[in-house]
Amino acid sequence: MAVLPSEGESPAPARGALVLADLPARRGRGWLHSLDISIPAVLLIALAFTCFVWPYLYKIPSPVGGGILTGSLPVGSPGHLLGTTVVGNDIMSRLIYGGRISIEIMFAVQGIGLVVGSLIGVTAAMMQGVAETIAMRILDVIIAFPAIILVVVIVLGLGASEATLIWALAVVMIPIFARVSRAGAVTIREQTYIVAAELSGSKRWRIALRHVLPNILMSLLTFAVLGAGIVVILEATVSFFGYGIPPPGPSWGNMIAVGAQTMSTRPVLLLVPSVVLLVTVIALNTLGEGMRRRWGTLR
Amino acid sequence: MTVDGSDETGATGGPATLPGAPTAPGAANGESVLLEVRHLVQEFPIRNAGGVKGGMLQAVSDVSFTLRAGEALGIVGETGSGKSTLARSVIQAPPPRSGEVIFDGVDLTKLRRRQLGPLRRHVQMVFQDPYSSLDPKWRVKDIVAEPLVAYEAGDRRQRQARVDELLDLVGLDPETYGARRPGQLSGGQAQRVAIARAIALHPQLVICDEPVSSLDVLVQAQVLNLFEKLRQELALAYLFIAHDLALVKQVSDRVIVLYLGKVCELGPSDGLYAEPLHPYTLALLKSIPDTDPTIRRARTKEVISGELPSPLDPPSGCRFRTRCPRAQARCAEEVPVLRPLRKDHFVACHFPLHERGGGAVGAAGTAVALGEASA
Amino acid sequence: MSTPVVTPTEAAGGHAEGEGGLRWWAAFTSSPTLRLAVRRILIAIPVMLGVTFLTSVLLNLLPGDAASALLGANATPQEIRQLYLKLHLNESFFVRYWQWLDGVFHGHLGVSLQNTQPVAQIIGQHLPVTFELIVYSTLVMVFVTIPIAMLCARRPGGIVDRITMILSMGFLSIPQFVLGLLFVLVFAVVWKIFPALGYTPITQSLGANLKDFTLPALTIALPFSGFYIRLLRGDLIEQMESQDYVVTARAKGFGSWYILTRHAFRNSLISFVTIVGLNVAQLFAYTVIVEEIFGLPGLGYQLLTGVSDRNTPLVQAIVLVFAGIVVIVNLFTDLTYGVIDPRVRYGRSAI
């Protein structure tokens, strides 16, 4: 086989400039300089601010309990910036309160998923052997199950509310977190510094807590951001089908469901919540990818 | 440089023990044996793409040796000769497939994982790649303190003082380096940190798995000197693994030459260096870049030819025969046993370069025979 | 230095056994592909059992029971009690799961609680719809992804690449139900090119059938394509920039496009096929959504209604079928490596 003499040299780069995505993580500069992290981060902070702080600064109409008198107002009506629904609820405030629920659910589910999932995953990896195999098989079963059906069944069983939705979505996310953290822990446990720690006399739980966990933490956080997009989508989907946040409670999912019924006459009712939902998920995914590119996945 | 161990042995040495006898070769009578390895075998299952079990890879097959307190024993071999596996087997990470590892009178292979803890504090290890043996997220002072914390040695302030003391001992300023992370250290500095961690609990034995081979030449010398200094100050015993015979000679009293998981030759480092008995040892010596004018050796440039055979399917008889210039029919049929030809100097070869009683068989002639493929 | 993982001694042992009338066994042990297949299936069995068991547990935990759910609000307590006993709902949960499992091993999937129609018959009616949807969307997925990813990889950072990267991020982020609704809005309400709802059997009219399936298939496929394009593009670019064989081919004077299509793509194909195969499991989840939105009478739709009706036998059977298909597709994916990458076929690989 012909081997080029200049083996050490890297091959000529493809023509054209490289896109942002191809640049290796520039560790020298602060993370705020990476546009793919800072832009979505700012966007998400703005969204959180609008949903949680804005209603306290400026009085906004109630998202529920609107009267038929103010029903079906068009976009740009005085006092109702984005108009009202058929039953007279302000769309803007429904978006804000729906967003609040989405963000709350997202944080709660990813928080539970991160803690419980990494606990399961790292424990499984540290146990090794049969226990590890059995634990991972059980998680496989839950992951193999269609997520939507799982959430619907649990919500039906417990009764629909924000809290039950959080637990149902956590059941979906915990095995995924467990699998990711176990995969990470398996690569870490093969590292020489784990052998060194064992030789130093550190107990296994201490190695798991002080060596394994810190070294997979950044990739777990990255995954939590990427997975947050999935949670927001799942929540919206389940609410769209009427199994999630019970109407008239505001949720982007059931707003879209309502909008879908009048899409030929008032498409704005469908488009506005759809766009808000889409932008949120895009921001989460872009942020997640930016984080992954910068802090890397596990080696 | 290292004259203490070997010279004493020479003075007291009785008749050499045969391999296979209860005491492994090299065990000197009357000396306190710190570590004794008997018939150690280590194997790994090979799995293919689908996770289906393939063959067994025998990385170390039937290796025996002893190590006296305060002695430095070198282990030399090519990449894939099983020397690192041997080292890991000694510290039971993972435990060997069969054989005994007797440390201070206790067979480590018979102990459960939990019982190993208190014993293992007397055996420490320094790894090849200093960066991968240090947790990248930890600060230097926490790394060095880890064994102290694990064995609850003293209170917080005492531990801190001990860490500073240890860093001073390995030549790092605690003020400057204590708060750094491994990524902010040079290779030599990182290895010094690893050494400080290894000696934190006053171990009796430090296993050094190619501790300088990833360092720059200049740094290598410094770290080797550090090893030497620590040995004298702390009365450490070393199991010093390297692929470079010259380097091993510098630190070791005795040397084991390993080839495909088997011992080829075992002897005092001076004797082995001056008068190698196994053709493989000679080949290893030849491969050392000849820069030292004090070493008188035929200036032949030949190195060993061919590649290491697959350990999955080692050659029959003598494992070195496929690359050995002296190989004959007998070498393919009969596994050579390790036998003493000199005082404390053993060889596993049917046709050693020198026979019993000294007298050159013709090292130069062999060298010519070896030199079929010039590099 | 790569090491062959099947030792010569082992291969020899396999043949020796073959002489004693155990030829099939010899063929089996010496065929890595077959061993891989059996291993996969053996691993899959406990997972499938687990999935059906989980289904039972979950449905059992639901408040209310099938008897009251089926008879509705106007039924008398006596009627409910009668049906309750008739459906063996008085038996313990484990007994019912065991009875169901026993039936499955004897080829009976049970009857629907709703209309006593055999479950196997219901699946026979509705599976083709879901199957067509999955095949259609997988084809769309693959044929959208490959050319676009190659165009991007040809000139990374070029205008095509930049636009694709933005669009693909949009598509991979869009919830399937939102995409479906937007498609309906644009292509059925505003432009009236495709029907918003409905299903024409393929036997009636192929054209109408394909028209019915186009928007649902696009709805499932495009978010996946967004994801796959980024994946394949990244892999291709990495190959073009760092692999030795690319350097060699360049030195021989081949153009970028030639190397990309003949060399890099062939190598990337393995990981691409793997990821597409593994994600078939995910597709089933999305058929539930899409069949509901577009009113396609597939299994996903049956699954959702089955859950709200507490129609345990039906839900169990559908879950079993879905899990079985996933196992088969994953197995098929594994075996496809052998076609693409001969090293796998011969049971050799670098450790």
Image (spheres, rainbow, N blue to C red):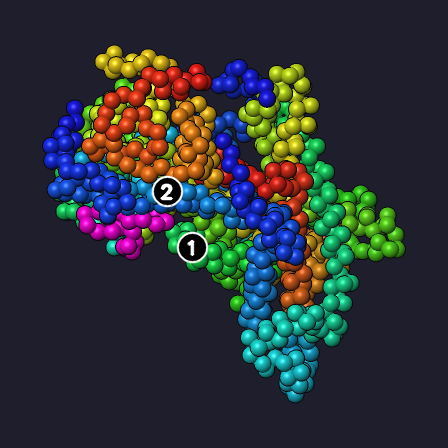
- Chain label for disc 1: A
Image quadrant in which you'd find residue B23 = top left
Which numbered tag is attached to residue C138? none
Q: Which residue is mark 2?
A: B61
Q: Position of residue B157 (x, y in %)?
A: 14, 43
Q: Is residue B40 above or below residue A167?
A: above
Relative to residue A128, is residue C164 drawn left or right? right
Amino acid type shown at disc 1:
Gly
Q: In the image, what residue occupies the spot 24% across and 48% down? A: B22
Question: Is residue B107 found inside the magenta-colored segment of the image?
Answer: yes
Q: Position of residue B124 (x, y in %)?
A: 24, 41
Relative to residue A70, is residue A215 drawn left or right? left
Comparing A198 with A222, the one in front is A198
Image quadrant in which you'd find residue B174 = top left
Magenta-colored span? B96-114
- Badge 2 marks a residue whose secondary structure is strand
Q: Is residue B177 above or below residue A58?
A: above
Q: Which residue is mark 1?
A: A129
Amino acid type shown at disc 2:
Ser
Question: Is residue B271 found inside the magenta-colored segment of the image?
Answer: no
Q: Is residue B330 above or below residue B23?
A: above
Q: In the image, what residue occupies the spot 65% across and 69% down? A: C105
Q: In the image, what residue occupies the spot 25% across and 29% down? A: B356
